[in-house]
Image: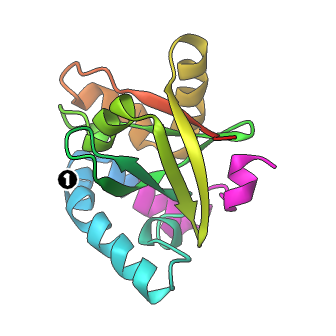
Amino acid sequence: MSLAAGLGVIPPGRSPLARGVRYLASTGPGSRLASRLVPPLDAAFLRASHGRVTASEWVAGLPTVHLTTTGARSGLPRTVALAAVVIGDDLAVIGSNWGRSQHPGWVHNLAAHPGALVSRAGRRVPVTAAEATGDMAERIWQEARQLYRGFRIYPERTGGRQIRVFLLRPTN
């Protein structure tokens, strides 16, 4: 079974509300606001839904997974909610960090420790992450740009930082 199907990752919502929220979150002011509001809202939605749905999924219609990495320096588990990009049977995640100039912490963690755990709606799958380059990175970017407008805009906002993308495959 594919990683995406096993976790129940679904295509993005097409409602006018979901499209509007995704558009707003991709703008400069919207992404600054969303970067502060979304993490606590996601946590609240997860508590209220007993781990079944995040605010990103319910309001914006974005397929969301939780990625648990091992801290590059601390060695402690670190969990973050991320938009999931379906690539065939696998998933990809993008270190856009809302278009900020620095990489998010989870990127450093995956680079140091590629073994991770992906979870969604109570399902958990151990994965191995590999940084995507070349044609695979371009394929992920193409899918990501269709998923969420921010992925088209964030590279311009990073101040020249190369946004890293990772392909996640189930660990055998």
Front-most of residues 3 and 73: 73
For this view, does 155 lie left or right of residue 17? Answer: left
Q: Mark 1 is on which residue type?
A: Arg
Query: Which residues are drawn in magenta?
Result: 1-22
Q: Label 1: few (<14), some or many (≥20) within 10 Å?
A: some
The location of residue 165, given as percent across then percent down, is: 45, 29
**Which residue is at a point 35% across and 46% down the rendered structure image?**
70
Q: Tell me if residue 10 can be seen.
A: no
Compared with 127, 121 (above or below) is below
The location of residue 134, given as percent across then percent down, is: 54, 11
- Is label 1 in a helix, a strand or a loop? helix
For this view, does 36 lie left or right of residue 38? Answer: left
For this view, does 150 lie left or right of residue 138? Answer: left
Residue 20 colored in magenta in the image:
yes
The location of residue 22, given as percent across then percent down, is: 43, 56
The location of residue 8, given as percent across then percent down, is: 69, 62
* Residue that numbered label 1 is attached to: 32
Compared with 104, 29 (above or below) is below
**Which residue is at a point 41% across and 84% down the rendered structure image?**
47
